[in-house]
Image (spheres, coloured by chain):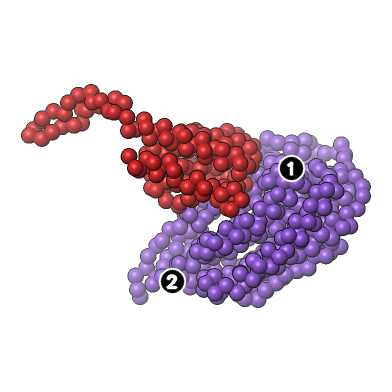
Chain colours: A purple, B red
Amino acid sequence: MSTQYNIPVGAQHISLLEPLHFKFTTENEKIIKTEANVGYVHRGIEQACCSKFKFRQVSFVVGRVCGLCSISHTTCYSQVAEKLLKLDIPKRAKYLRMLVIELDRIHSHLLCLSHVAENSGFEALFMKTMRHREFSMELLEAVCGNRIQYDFSIIGGVARDLRTDVAQSILDKFKIFRPQLDELVDIYKTNWSLSLKNKGIGVLSKEDAIRLNVVGPFARASGLGVDVRNETEELLPWKEVGFEIITDTAGDVHARNMVRLKEIYVSMKIIENIINGLPEGDLISDTKAFPEGEAVNRIEAPRGELFYYAKGNKTQVLERLKIKAPTFSNIPAMVETFTNNEYASVPAIIGSYDPCLSCTSR
Amino acid sequence: MALNKFRTKSPWILHYNAGSCNGCDIEILACLAPKYDIERFGMINTGNPKQSDIMLVTGPVTKRSRERLVDIYSQMPEPKVVIACGSCGCSGGVFRGMYNCEGGIDQYIPVDVYVPGCGCRPEQIIAGVVEALAILEKKTKDMEGSVKLHNDPIEQDGQTNRREVAAVI
């Protein structure tokens, strides 16, 4: 047996956006064991939501759980609160929520792809992807009023209407973006130097994906077709606006890139359908009731299934709020997928997981 | 000195997330990207505290990340400037009073520039960094001003003892 070395990565590292600590045990450059430590960003949001904030304020607080998928958090909380209040929301509000969720997915996926490119050592592709990503931030600012932390979903509906000129500008910018995305797909798919760092690296088989309960693009790249948008219809009508599931079979970093790129096409199709068929009506339906009983809700965040549980007791303050974020489900698979890969490919693999630690530890 | 010129013309930044929601972090990343392009001020994102001049910190300091924050700060060479990005980095923001948050970066390390906003816009970050450049220049001048010694070094036990020498800037 050759010598084993322990190599720590994190909590502060150039390839990490967030404090995340991995301890690798390596043997001849090959990783044989990994330990993950993810609790650096625990802030105590769940406890504060049940004691400090009233239930109508909580939708703004849970948006601050994560800056990348804040619309998923606010929408999921709003839906679970609407279940407690027994409130039906207008159809226009549902469509606008879907619109912003999909715009958010575009910017999140492009950020992840650029991060993979940077961590693979392809700085020029990072810059190119980030340049093409800016249009989605501009659109989010035009629709919601802020580049990140758009408190768009509130209990009962949405906070802002979609102006017709903004809707037109979304369609116009998509026309510019589509050839740029085609070019990006071409680079990510066929670039030889990128494929050295991506193809066959960090493979997760379908059996392992089922066994380790993986969600999101990570699972879909392994051939496991799990998507909440495919399963739930009653709260947000995904099928109506042309959702289709994207899967790949290889399960490596390259397959994850491909799944994310193809999902951007689906998101663009959904947004175009929403804008072309946006129903008229109110933006918000209000009630004076207080939350009562228990409810759960699921939604597909850019990283996978987001789960909320809430319990109310007919007062202004919730009794319990539980958030289970997608990355939390993926940690066991993340730790296992490193095994038998070279230490040099670790940054690219971490990037391809698209981990969101502030979601995980709340 | 030539080094000073390069330091102000090309400061290297270090980014640390002390429990933020990622919002300000992706805006810092957007600053490095072509649209806002912070590199035209000569800035490069480094992962190494020992090579950095400007530290960009986001987030309310959580109890687990505060030791790392102080550790990284103390590893940076003088002169150094700290920029607190985002509302929660400045004061704790929405997380102020939560049981695992300390409420602001200035509770633990000295902050020179505060960038407000939730999340802070790239334009604001660039304005904060440009302000930090002036502070960096001033700190460099202060450091290299003429130093007057309180006491002369004394001969003790056959060798020069400089322990009692205190400097006044």
- First in sequence, mark 1 or 2: give its number: 2
Other residues around mark 1 within 10 Å, as few (<14) / some (14–19) / many (≥20): some
Q: Residue furthest right?
A: A280
**A200 relative to B74, above or below:** below
Residue at figure coordinates x 69%, y 41% from the top left? A61
Chain letter of mark 1 equals A
Left or right: where B82 falls relative to B166: right
Q: Which residue is mark 1?
A: A145
Say if labels 1 and 2 share a chain: yes
Q: Position of residue B90 (x, y in %)?
A: 56, 34
Q: Position of residue B67 (x, y in %)?
A: 45, 43
The answer to whether any part of residue A143 appears in the image is yes
Residue at figure coordinates x 88%, y 43% from the top left? A285
Left or right: where B160 falls relative to A235: left
Would you identify the image quadrant in which residue B78 lies?
top left
Of the residues shown, which amino acid type is indicated by label 1? Answer: Gly
The answer to whether any part of residue B98 appears in the image is no
Chain letter of mark 2 equals A
**B81 relative to A357, above or below:** above
Q: Which residue is mark 2?
A: A30
Asked which secondary structure carries label 1, the reply is: loop
Of the residues shown, which amino acid type is indicated by label 2? Answer: Lys
Other residues around mark 2 within 10 Å, as few (<14) / some (14–19) / many (≥20): some
Residue at mark 1 to residue at mark 2: CA–CA distance: 48 Å
Q: Which image quarter is the N terminus of chain A in?
A: bottom left
Residue at figure coordinates x 78%, y 54% from the top left? A170
Q: Position of residue A114 (x, y in %)?
A: 59, 60
Looking at the rendered image, the disc whose residue lies closer to the viewer, 1 or 2, is 1
Q: Nearer the viewer, residue A58 or A240?
A: A240
Q: Could you say which disc has been placed on residue A193 in the image?
A: none
Q: Residue furthest left?
A: B158
